[in-house]
Amino acid sequence: MELVTKVRKNSWLFLRRAIKELVSHDDSKDNGLTEETATISTMFIQIAFELSLVAHFIKKDGIHGIVKGSDSSLTEEELLAKFEDNDLNTKSFNSLKKQAIDNHVFLYDDDKCLIDEFQKVRNKLVHLNYKFDTNDLYDLKYDLTYFIVKVIIPILSEEYDRPSEAISINLDSKDFVKLINFPPYAYEMYKVAKKQSDFVYKCVHCENESLAVDYGNEHCYSCCFDYTGAGFIDCPYCKSRVAMIYDALNIDAQGDLTIRALCLKCKKDDMVYHCQKCDAEVALKASAGGGKCHFGYCEWDE
């Protein structure tokens, strides 16, 4: 529906500005946000959130899902005409928020408290003032990031499992790199990755601990790098499960069927051999003399 697209586009406009402001914060010393960054980010995130709810209910119920009063009895064509004239009589944010809560739109029911708190802060910023204390400014960098990832993105983009994918295609590439390197975001992506797999390691591309190794679904939840084509075996050195990575696409093209591998946990490297007979993948240096498969020999032959 064209109207949904328009409203979502407006929501992304404010969300992009909020993220740009948030990642402008230098977090190298783990300091709290400045009052200016906290104020601007909070305002833009709240506006983006309100618009995301509007888009959600337009998609769910049509344009009648967001209007009230006498507008409720109008036809869709009449309502669209009023929309173009900036004359729609729309439901309040509180009304849409209540509908969303009643219909379990949010990922987590506990988010209601955070949503209410954000609304209070936003209202005070708009109508009078809000005095942030030092703890507020520190906590906000995590709360704002959580709000983007777990509250807005699932509603705005209907992307529940891979928020970075939705963000990456709607954000300037330079700002996305800054976001990936923003510690509160890296922390959120670590939590997202842990929900997908018990085995989460540092991504070799963005260096965030957000690479979830789940058979057939190896993916970095920070930078969106797809590890399809990579092979993972248990590390023989630190014993971490599926932590040693190698190029599974090209190992069979090597004359001796071996290729370099690196443990994402302990950083030990080795040469992995792929046995064509039994399909075993063996770290050669670690298993030397142990009767494991190696070039020209398969332990099945014993």
Image (spheres, grey):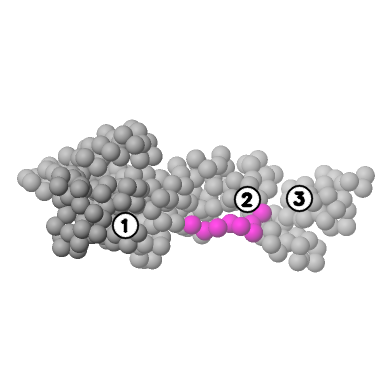
* Amino acid type of the residue that numbered disc 2 sits on in the rendered structure: Gly
Q: Is residue 86 above or below residue 183?
A: below
Disc 1 and disc 3 in contact, CB within 8 angstroms:
no
The tag earlier along the polypeptide, 1 or 3, is: 1
Q: Does any portion of residue 152 appear in the rendered image? A: no
Q: Which residues are magenta?
A: 224-231
* Quadrant (top left, top right, bottom left, bottom right) of the N terminus: bottom left
Q: Quadrant of residue 16?
A: bottom left
Residue 184: x and y, percent?
A: 36, 47
Task: From the image, tell me which residue sits under label 3.
Answer: 282
According to the picture, the residue beneath numbered tag 1 turns out to be 4
Answer yes or no: is residue 253 visible: yes
Of residues 299 and 158, the one drawn nearer to the viewer in this rendering? 158
Which of 275 and 134 lies nearest the eye of the viewer?
Answer: 275
Cα separation, mark 1 vs mark 3, equals 53 Å
Image point 52% across, 43% down: which residue? 196
Residue identified by numbered label 2: 216
Number of callouts = 3
Lower sequence index among marks 1 and 2:
1
Q: Amino acid at mark 1?
A: Val
